[in-house]
Image (cartoon, rainbow, N blue to C red):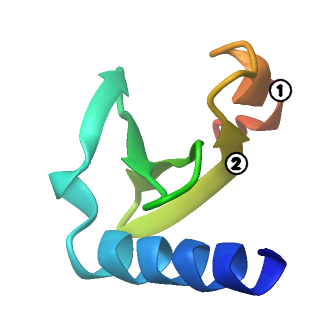
Amino acid sequence: VADRFEERVDQAVAKVLASPLSAVCFQPDIRRHLVKGFPQSLIYRVHDQQLQLFAVMHHKRHPDSWKGRLDDS
């Protein structure tokens, strides 16, 4: 299961890198991309032409649990 999870996260990251603005924008400038087959999402933003990945977050976590990782620099 761990190998499959790692593979799916890698696939999700590749999709986000290929088309970063296609994922759902669920908060201002913050996007969420689902990890296929698992109850997790990539939480990220595009900032200064860079992709900033904040978390691979489980769907049962509080929706704001990743915010402590936000760096506005």
Q: Amino acid at mark 2?
A: Ala
Mark 1 or mark 2, earlier in chain: 2
Left or right of 21, for residue 28: right
* Label 1 CA crowd tier, 10 Å (few <14, some 14–19, many 20+): few
Numbered label attached to residue 68: 1
Q: Quadrant of residue 21?
A: bottom left
| Residue at 60% in and 58% down | 53
Q: Determine whether the residue tagged by mark 2 lies in a helix, strand or loop.
A: strand
Q: Quadrant of the C terminus?
A: top right
Mark 2 = which residue? 55
Does residue 3 sit above or below 15 in this rendering?
A: below
Q: Quadrant of the N terminus?
A: bottom right
Left or right of 36, for residue 55: right
Residue 4: % across, % down = 66, 81
| Residue at 47% in and 65% down | 51
Residue 65: % across, % down = 78, 21
